[in-house]
Image: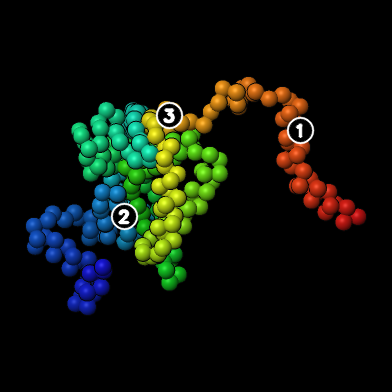
Amino acid sequence: ISPIREIQKETSEVREYEKQYLIDKGFSVSDKVSSYSINENLLGTTISGSEIDEWLQPDSASYVLTKPPGTQAKAPSLLKLHFEQGRLSALNDQQLGQSITGKEVMQQLNQSVGEYSIGRNIYTGDTTIGLKGRIVFEAPAIEALNVAHTALEQAVLSKAQNRFKSTVADKWTELVYEGLFYEPLKDDLEAFLQSSQSQVTGTVTLELSQGHVYAVAVESDNILKDKDSVYAQTASWTIEEALGFIKLFGKSSTMAAKQRLDNRG
């Protein structure tokens, strides 16, 4: 669905047409739309036009959900997010579906996280036909949710699952971005994603500070840890066992390196 194409049949001044259309329908229109094309929804905002299209530094006027540089910094604060099988179920003490809706979660996070100038970036990508596109995007809520969800996944999923998931995420994004929403492979990828979330249950504490969001604590019964298998300050294996593993694990690489040296004479 691309109604903008129909508008282009009538006028080349698409932005002015859209602005007047919204005003006629009773919507308020920010003065920023005279310089920028701003698209907003619950997930975030994209901003293009003016100096952004010219590959120049975006002006402070292009900030919508986040605070521009130089804004007085807020004191750091904490957020708690609870997940059940990969899905957000609570924000601080507010239960999703009871005291707060999904829409309200996104609105709250976009406002509270955006005040710390978190979630803004510049994206340069290639369209399906290979043309370069450049936009500024602001997604404070998504940034916070992603940091929390990833921290929980890293704690409860296996090494192989975490590595493979990033590959799946990249491919899923590529398919959807290029308009292949009904591609069967997308459904296959989603089946893996759903299966991988069965253990992703727990609470993550985020610390918000100016321009940064960190997962500072993770609580879950599913964290992959064992009192007999520890790492860091102490270990449940001997030095000899560790040396043996290192020697065997790197055997193929050292053999290949030695072979190259021998061939050089």
Q: Earlier in the sequence, mark 2 or mark 1?
A: 2
Nearer-the-camera pick, 91 or 135: 91
The residue wearing badge 1 is: 244
Outermost residue, right side: 265
Which of labels 2 and 1 is toward the front? 1
- The structure residue drawn at horizontal position 30% and vertical position 49%, both measured from the top left corner, is 44
**In this image, 6 relative to 190: left or right?**
left
Q: Quadrant of residue 111?
A: top left
Q: Report the amino acid beneath label 3.
A: Ser
Q: Which residue is mark 3?
A: 220
Helix, strand or loop at label 3? It is loop
Residue at image position (53%, 39%) is 158
What separation in Å lies between label 3 and label 1 (alpha carbons)? 33 Å
Q: Which residue is mark 2?
A: 46
Q: Earlier in the sequence, mark 3 or mark 1?
A: 3
> Distance of mark 2 from mark 1, alpha carbons?
53 Å
Along the horizontal axis of the image, is 178 left or right of 104? right
User: How dense is the environment of label 3, judged by Cα within 10 Å: few (below 14), some, or many (20 and up)?
Assistant: some
Give the amino acid at mark 1. Answer: Gly
Foreground: disc 3 or disc 2: 3
Point out residue 109 in the picture as x, y percentages from the top left corner: 29, 39
What number is the disc on residue 157? none
Query: How far separated are the C-alphas under marks 3 and 2?
Result: 35 Å
User: How is the structure coloured here?
Assistant: rainbow
Q: Give how far across and how far down residue 116 sits, in percent.
A: 33, 37
